[in-house]
Image (cartoon, rainbow, N blue to C red):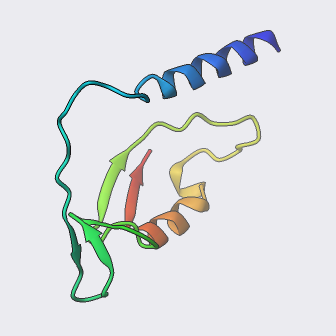
């Protein structure tokens, strides 16, 4: 149990490592535009609110560690992936 708590603490600290104030004055000039097809606000290819998240499909490769309850042997058996991909317009390669 102590190992799990230590691992969780390290993961939390690592995820927060990039947070905080910095003296870097570089700012991103992200301009919001109105998508003529949907009438929704966008920044580049990403919608500001709602689903789908992106207008043009995007593909991301990611690693997913199986849980003890996961009995699937392939990506095709993960029933949540098609639902996520349909709703977000983002394709996940595992």
Please tell me in which quadrant of the rendered image residue 49 appears.
bottom left
- Quick check: 77 left or right of 56? right
Locate residue 46, reporting x and y percent. 30, 64
- Quick check: 84 left or right of 23? right
Please tell me how many numbered marks the rendered image carries: 0
- Quick check: 67 left or right of 93? right
Q: Residue at x 60, y 56 (%)?
A: 77
Nearer to us in this view, 20 or 46: 20
Residue furthest right as drawn: 1
Vertical placement of 66 versus 72: above or below?
above
Tell me the quadrant of the picture where the N terminus can be found. top right
Vertical placement of 88 versus 91: above or below?
below
Vertical placement of 15 versus 55: above or below?
above
Locate residue 39, reporting x and y percent. 30, 87
Locate residue 57, reporting x and y percent. 29, 66
Q: Residue at x 47, y 36 (%)?
A: 63
Q: Residue at x 39, y 66 (%)?
A: 53
Vertical placement of 36 versus 60: above or below?
below
Nearer to us in this view, 2 or 78: 2
Q: Residue at x 44, y 44 (%)?
A: 94
Nearer to us in this view, 17 or 1: 17
């Amino acid at each position: 149990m102590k190992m799990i708590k230590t691992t969780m603490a390290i993961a939390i600290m690592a995820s927060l490592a990039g947070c905080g104030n910095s003296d870097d004055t570089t700012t991103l000039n992200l301009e919001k535009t109105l998508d003529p097809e949907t009438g929704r606000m966008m920044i580049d290819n990403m919608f500001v609110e709602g689903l789908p998240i992106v207008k043009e499909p995007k593909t991301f490769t990611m690693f997913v560690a199986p849980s003890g309850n996961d009995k699937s042997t392939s990506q095709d058996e993960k029933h949540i992936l098609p639902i996520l991909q349909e709703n977000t317009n983002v394709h996940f390669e595992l």
